[in-house]
Image (cartoon, rainbow, N blue to C red):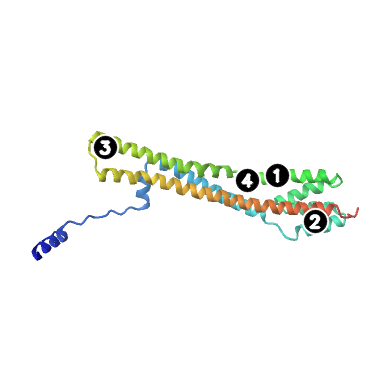
Amino acid sequence: MTTNFLTILLQIVEEPQVQVQSLNLFDLIVKGGIIMLPIFLLSFLSIYIMVERYFFISKAGKIDKSFMQNIKQALHNGNRQEALALCKKVDSPIAHVIEKGIHRIGLPIKDIQDEIQTIGSIEMSKMENKLSYLGLVAGTAPMLGFIGTIMGIIKIFYNISLSDNISIGIIAGGLYEKMITSCAGLIVGVVAYTGYHYLNMMIDKFALQVEITASEFIDLLREPIKK
């Protein structure tokens, strides 16, 4: 009994150890195949759009808190040109909206409100520019990854049919390589999806700020203004 146990133990010790080959990121990308190229192009596109839009929206949303106070003071003093000069000095969508409203002073309040809403919509459209591409990447990248995986599986079973050799090594070895595309596509899709909604949240916050400022301006027009 003891002899048999020692024999089995010696066999385990003498059995050649299987060396596990480590893979780095570059190896994984290469093994993913040609479908990784469009996925990476989509990733670069989404990163560029997210960075460019983030700085654009952040810059557009920054405005001095004293801006409206200075506008109110200038209009109360009857100095419309000074108010316009303040708007031109501050290169911001909010300043553009107020500038359009100042140009329309003298018209009925309803007409001024309509003009302000129109300019506000145009400024929001400028901020939303290119965001639709992020939505496209968020939907396209995962599908490209799945297509790469399916193409790989088809190739695996085709090779099996030719060699008439079904082994776990052949199936698993080829399958893990092809699932790399699905993983890459999902990662790019998640990043683009997150960026798309985060930037839209920034725009919604800014849109609320524009509405509040426009409302303050309309209230200002209802107050007595020096001629």
The structure residue drawn at horizontal position 37% and vertical position 45%, both measured from the top left corner, is 179
Quadrant in which residue 146 is drawn: top left
Residue 128 is tagged as 4
199 left or right, relative to 95: left
Q: In what element is the residue under mark 3?
A: helix
- N-terminal of the two: label 3 or label 2? 2
Q: Which amino acid does label 4 sit on?
A: Glu
Where 54 sits versus 115, above or below? below
* Number of marks: 4
The residue at which mark 3 appears reads as 160
Residue closest to the far right: 227
Q: In what element is the residue under mark 2?
A: helix
164 left or right, relative to 41: left
Q: What residue type is labelled 1?
A: Ser
Q: In whole angstroms, how far apart are the C-alphas of marks 1 and 2?
A: 22 Å
Residue closest to the far top: 162
Provide residue 78's location: percent of width, then percent of height. Answer: 87, 54
Q: Nearer the viewer, residue 18 or 12?
A: 12
- N-terminal of the two: label 2 or label 4? 2
The structure residue drawn at horizontal position 26% and vertical position 37%, both measured from the top left corner, is 160
Q: In whole angstroms, how far apart are the C-alphas of marks 3 and 2?
A: 77 Å
- N-terminal of the two: label 1 or label 2? 2
The residue at which mark 2 appears reads as 71
Q: In whole angstroms, how far apart are the C-alphas of marks 1 and 4?
A: 10 Å
Query: Which is in the foreground here, disc 3 or disc 2?
Result: 3
The structure residue drawn at horizontal position 53% and vertical position 41%, both measured from the top left corner, is 136
Q: In whole angstroms, how far apart are the C-alphas of marks 3 and 1?
A: 59 Å
- N-terminal of the two: label 3 or label 1? 1
